[in-house]
Image: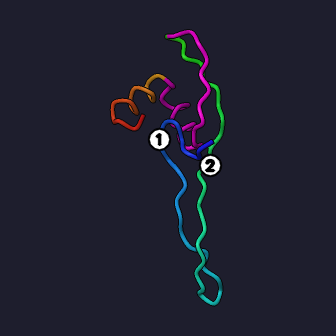
Amino acid sequence: MSRICDLTGKGVITGNNVSNSNRKTKRTFLPNLKLKKFYIPEEDKWITLKVSTSAVKTISKNGITACINKFVKTGKI
């Protein structure tokens, strides 16, 4: 299972752990992903998406169909 948001496309990024003595070692920053079920009233069905928590906030603000249409139009999905 990949760690990529289904709507926004957020994924794993890499960076450095920096110690007190300023030594740098590689690390990964994982996105905050959750499996969430959404109801689409136009199609009268439930879908399960792996979305980031920022995408969940956007969906609760604008609605699932508006968000899906927006992300399809911008080419993210």
Q: Which residues are magenta?
A: 43-64
**What amino acid type should be assigned to the residue bearing mark 2?**
Asn
Q: Please, which residue is most extreme toward the bottom here?
A: 21
Report whether 1 appears left or right of 62.
right
35 versus 18 height, above or below: above
9 versus 64 height, above or below: below
Q: Please, which residue is most extreme toward the front here?
A: 1
- Counting from the top left corner in percent of width and height, residue 64 is at 51, 25
Residue at the image position 65 percent from the left and 40 percent from the top: 34
Cα separation between marks 1 and 2: 12 Å
Is 57 a magenta residue? yes
Q: Secondary structure at mark 1?
A: loop
Of the two numbered discs 1 and 2 on the same chain, state the one appearing first in sequence.
Answer: 1
- Counting from the top left corner in percent of width and height, residue 22 is at 59, 87
Q: Nearer the viewer, residue 1 or 4?
A: 1
Pointer 1: what residue? 8
Crowd around label 2: few <14 · some 14–19 · many ≥20 (10 Å): some
Pointer 2: what residue? 32
- The quarter of the displayed image where residue 71 is located: top left
- The quarter of the displayed image where residue 40 is located: top right
- Counting from the top left corner in percent of width and height, residue 44 is at 56, 9
Residue at the image position 52 percent from the left and 32 percent from the top: 59
Q: Secondary structure at mark 2?
A: loop
69 versus 55 height, above or below: above
Report whether 49 appears left or right of 58.
right
Q: Nearer the viewer, residue 14 or 70?
A: 14
